[in-house]
Each structure stands twice: as C-alpha cells, then as structure tokens.
Amino acid sequence: MYRQLHRISGEQKALIEDMLDAETFADRFGELVLEWNNVQSAVMQLEDRLRREVGMETFNKSFESEILPIARQIHATMVQAEERIKQGIARTGVSIHNLQHYRNARHAYAEYEDYQAIFFDEKK
C-alpha cells in the first residue's frame, strides 16, 4: 500500500509539472486525491490491526526496515510537488500584477469613450 502511495504521489508531481489544461488537471488531480485518501485510510486501518496482532515492538522494527525508506521517498516527492505548486503560484501572481499594470497604462493612454485618462506625460 505504501508503494501505491508512492505511485500516486509520483503521478501528482508529474501532473503538476506537465500541467497543460486546467480542466483536465483539476479532474485528474481530484481523482488522485481521492485515490490517495482511500489508500491512506486502508494503510491506517492495516497498521492498527498489525500493531494489535504483532505488537508495537515488532511493528516498529518492520516499519523501520521496510516501510520507512518508501515513506521518505513519498515525502521527498510531495515536497518537490509542493515546490512546483509554489513556483506556479508565484508566476501567476507576477502575471496578474503585470496584467494590471498593462491595463492601467492602456486605459490611461487609449482613446476610450468609457474611460478617462489617469496618467499624463509632461509632453502632452
């Protein structure tokens, strides 16, 4: 199940990196989130059952040797995906800011009936 979580996190990261179509991205990312939640819920139930059946000490030893390396890989993949999202948000913010400046300048110097000039050059 941890391998499934690793696969899902890898797919999420790849989807973020290759984001081409916003609608397709949202649908597929939503599917991956649902799949992640289902697998994670199953993992938690199985871990609880194993703790009860084999004991905490045996479970912890098994966890450290078999599962911890996969969990670390999952975490690293999720951190990388999070960084990509942050970069995308920052680029979007810059684009919006630049678009606002462009619109203000366009409205200031254009001959629109609905708008009045709000910027003036000394030359004019």
Image (cartoon, rainbow, N blue to C red):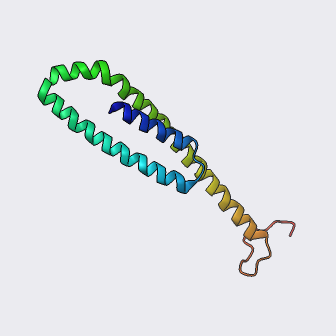
The answer to whether 11 is drawn above or below residue 30 in the figure is above
The answer to whether 6 is drawn above or below residue 108 in the figure is above
Q: Residue at x 34, y 31 (%)?
A: 2
Quadrant (top left/top right/bottom left/bottom right) for the N terminus: top left
In the picture, measured across the screen, residue 46 lies left or right of residue 28, that is: left
In the picture, measured across the screen, residue 85 lies left or right of residue 6, that is: right
The answer to whether residue 57 is seen in the rendering is yes
The answer to whether residue 55 is seen in the rendering is no
Nearest to the observer: residue 29 or residue 102: 29
Tell which residue pokes out farthest to the bottom in this image.
Answer: 113
Q: Quadrant of residue 59?
A: top left
Nearest to the observer: residue 102 or residue 56: 56
Image coordinates of residue 17 in percent, x first then y, are 56, 41
Q: How many marks?
A: 0
The answer to whether 67 is drawn above or below residue 33 in the figure is above
Image coordinates of residue 66 in percent, x first then y, are 31, 21
Nearest to the observer: residue 124 or residue 49: 49
Image coordinates of residue 84 in percent, x first then y, are 53, 40
Q: Residue at x 56, y 42 (%)?
A: 87
Quadrant (top left/top right/bottom left/bottom right) for the C terminus: bottom right
Image coordinates of residue 74 in percent, x first then y, are 40, 31
Q: Residue at x 36, y 43 (%)?
A: 36
